[in-house]
Image (cartoon, grey):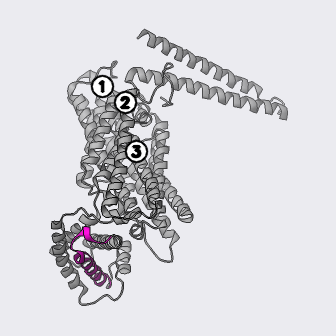
């Protein structure tokens, strides 16, 4: 049971970390929103969006993994 | 919770913990099933003495059988949740045991079904396509409707949405009929049974209403009558519910699985028979295993029915081929002065064909397909005639015609044991894989709180009762919709709150199933009939 919880703890931590990274990516994207409305800055801002998407997918993946582990623990599947 | 296929703690999660032993049994049964199908086909073909000139029909048969059994397999895991979701989430049975249990009862449900409903689904298809199912248009029809149904079922399963498989199949059938009608405007064939679409319309309104209201009521009554707090709180650990609730849940799970096998298995059987008749009519067009006593019964009912129809023909005779007029009546359900005379002529021809050889087994291989078509046509015409308000027949006359129809059906609407076994294996094994996605939706994503023992029992009991009521009173309801709405109903009655995004997706999938299946099957039919 204890080793189960260690694994769950790890997954929960991975999930929390992924969410933090995702939040950071959102903030980063927001910061890059062009002050001067220039094309070069917009390019960077758009680029940051893809990074944010990637982080979101990662966070969702970690969440799914943690949820699946919890389901396995409670319901056996 | 998201049902992503993930590794749990580094261990592979084989979709519900399939152990190596389970996997060996699974693939073992699959292999035995395939061998059994191959042997039975070989045996059937060699007993009829058909000379194998080309392998093309057998190749086509292989592909068609693969798709038809694939449809049953997908149907199996698409609908597992109806039987097991509440059982798993209330810890009444462990998950893997529950799906294997459900799979076994699906298997039994198919094997013990009468096969009587199997041809009901076939008779919804355009009659002119059934009569020439071996033609390219016939194959386009079978492939289009099966593939469309598989695609929609797989799609909704992938998204974890419990939508009705029956609505999907009927939508596909309507789609093929509609496309057939649109593509042959000149011949004026009518291929769409719109009453089926209306029934689905009612089902869309009725099922959620019955599921939601009845489950909510049952749950409220249960709460008032049985004042046991444990029933209405989240299950603790792996503790199973009290014995009587557990009993109800296991019993309803068993019943729902059995009924599903019986109903959905028969749909597959009907379609497989259509494929067999199309590819190797010499072997499967007529039931050659009928005993001679059936022959005597056929002759007797045939003469009695002929007397009834001849009398209605009022001395008019039919010159030339009676088949187009009878086909037109079956397609359009419009009785005119030519219907009775042409039906009488068709019946005379059938009697002549059959009596000439003395037994169904002796009808030569070359003519068996035509005899079958004539019998099928007469049977369908009589089935429609008996329901026709303008038929001008007394109840006794209708009974005579029904007897004749029954003896016709005994020789045309039969299902060999191996077809039942094949469908039973496909559906049974299908039930045991991939069930997780939809089970998770029903168990975790509809309500905001965990499903309690009381909620699970109320929703499942209503779903099981609906199947029984639908059988008895012919109610157009979908088990899948009733169960999902039932869970929602108990959540509402418990003031637990609903996850609106799931509810919205569910309703959208339910409403879209019919039009999407129609569109998919129609487009596929159009493409296939251009390609083949």
Q: Nearer the viewer, residue B266 or B313?
A: B266
- Give the image location of residue A66, x and y in percent: 50, 21
- Binning the other alpha carbons within 10 Å of mark 1 as few (below 14), some (14 to 19) or many (20 upward) gives some
- Specify few, some or many for label 2: CA neighbours under 10 Å numbering under 14, 14-19, or 20 or more: few
Does the magenta-highlighted stretch encompass residue B357?
Answer: yes
Nearest the viewer among B146 and B500 is B146
Q: Which badge, 2 or 3, comes first in the chain's sequence?
A: 2
Q: Main secondary structure of the magenta part?
A: helix
How far apart are labels 1 and 2 at the CA level? 35 Å
Q: Nearer the viewer, mark 1 or mark 2?
A: 2
Residue hosting label 1: B232
Q: Which residues are magenta?
A: B338-364
Task: Residue B74: name its quadrant.
Answer: top left
On the image, numbered disc 2 is attached to which residue? B22
Q: Is residue B238 above or below residue A45?
A: above
- B530 versus B483 height, above or below: below
| Residue designated by label 3 | B73
Q: Chain of mark 1?
A: B
The chain carrying label 3 is B
Which is more foreground, mark 1 or mark 3?
Answer: 3
């Amino acid at each position: 049971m204890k080793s189960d919880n260690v694994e769950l703890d790890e997954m929960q931590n991975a999930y929390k970390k992924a969410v933090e990274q995702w939040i950071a990516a959102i903030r980063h994207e927001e910061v890059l929103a062009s002050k001067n409305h220039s094309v070069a800055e917009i390019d960077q801002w758009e680029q940051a969006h893809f990074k944010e998407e990637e982080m979101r997918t990662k966070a969702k993946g970690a969440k799914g993994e943690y949820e699946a582990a919890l389901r396995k623990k409670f319901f056996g599947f | 919770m998201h049902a992503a296929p993930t590794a749990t703690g580094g261990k592979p999660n084989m979709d519900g913990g399939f152990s190596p032993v389970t996997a060996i049994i699974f693939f073992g049964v699959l292999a035995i099933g395939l061998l059994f199908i191959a042997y039975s086909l070989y045996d059937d073909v060699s007993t009829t003495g058909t000379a194998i000139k080309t392998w093309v029909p057998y190749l086509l048969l292989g592909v068609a059988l693969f798709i038809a059994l694939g449809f049953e397999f997908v149907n199996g895991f698409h609908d597992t949740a109806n039987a097991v979701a509440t059982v798993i989430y209330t810890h009444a049975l462990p998950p893997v045991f529950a799906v294997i249990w459900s799979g076994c009862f699906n298997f039994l449900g198919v094997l013990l079904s009468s096969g009587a409903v199997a041809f009901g689904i076939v008779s919804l298809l355009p009659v002119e396509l059934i009569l020439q199912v071996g033609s390219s248009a016939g194959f386009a029809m079978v492939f289009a409707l099966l593939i469309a149904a598989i695609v929609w079922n797989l799609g909704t399963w992938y998204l974890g949405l419990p939508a009705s498989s029956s609505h999907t199949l009927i939508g596909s059938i309507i789609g093929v009929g509609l496309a057939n009608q649109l593509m042959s405007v000149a011949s004026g064939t009518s291929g769409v049974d719109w009453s089926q679409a209306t029934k689905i319309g009612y089902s869309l309104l009725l099922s959620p209403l019955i599921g939601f209201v009845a489950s909510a009521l049952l749950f409220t009554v249960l709460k008032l009558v049985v004042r046991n707090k444990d029933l209405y709180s989240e299950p603790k650990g792996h503790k199973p519910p009290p014995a009587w609730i557990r009993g109800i849940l296991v019993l309803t799970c068993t019943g729902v699985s059995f009924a599903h096998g019986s109903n959905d298995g028969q749909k597959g059987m009907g379609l497989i028979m259509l494929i067999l008749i199309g590819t190797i009519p010499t072997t499967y067009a007529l039931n050659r295993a009928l005993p001679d006593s059936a022959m005597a019964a056929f002759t007797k009912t045939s003469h009695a029915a002929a007397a009834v129809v001849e009398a209605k023909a009022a001395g008019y005779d039919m010159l030339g081929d009676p088949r187009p007029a009878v086909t037109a009546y079956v397609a359009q359900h419009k009785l005119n002065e030519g219907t009775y005379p042409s039906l009488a002529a068709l019946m005379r021809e059938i009697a002549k064909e059959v009596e000439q050889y003395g037994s169904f087994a002796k009808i030569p291989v070359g003519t068996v397909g035509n005899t079958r078509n004539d019998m099928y046509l007469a049977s369908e015409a009589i089935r429609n005639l008996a329901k026709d308000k303008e038929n001008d027949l007394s109840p006794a006359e209708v009974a005579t015609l029904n007897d004749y129809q029954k003896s016709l059906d005994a020789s045309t609407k039969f299902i060999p044991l191996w077809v039942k076994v094949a469908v039973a294996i496909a559906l049974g094994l299908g039930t045991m894989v991939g069930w997780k996605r939809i089970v998770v939706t029903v168990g975790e994503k509809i309500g905001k709180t965990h499903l309690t023992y009381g909620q699970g029992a109320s929703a499942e009991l209503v779903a099981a009762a609906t199947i029984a009521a639908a059988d008895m009173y012919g109610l157009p309801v979908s088990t899948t919709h009733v169960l999902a709405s039932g869970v929602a109903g108990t959540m509402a009655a418990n003031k637990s709150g609903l996850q609106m995004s799931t509810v919205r997706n569910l309703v959208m999938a339910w409403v879209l199933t019919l039009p999407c299946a129609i569109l998919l099957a129609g487009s596929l039919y159009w493409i296939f009939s251009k390609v083949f």
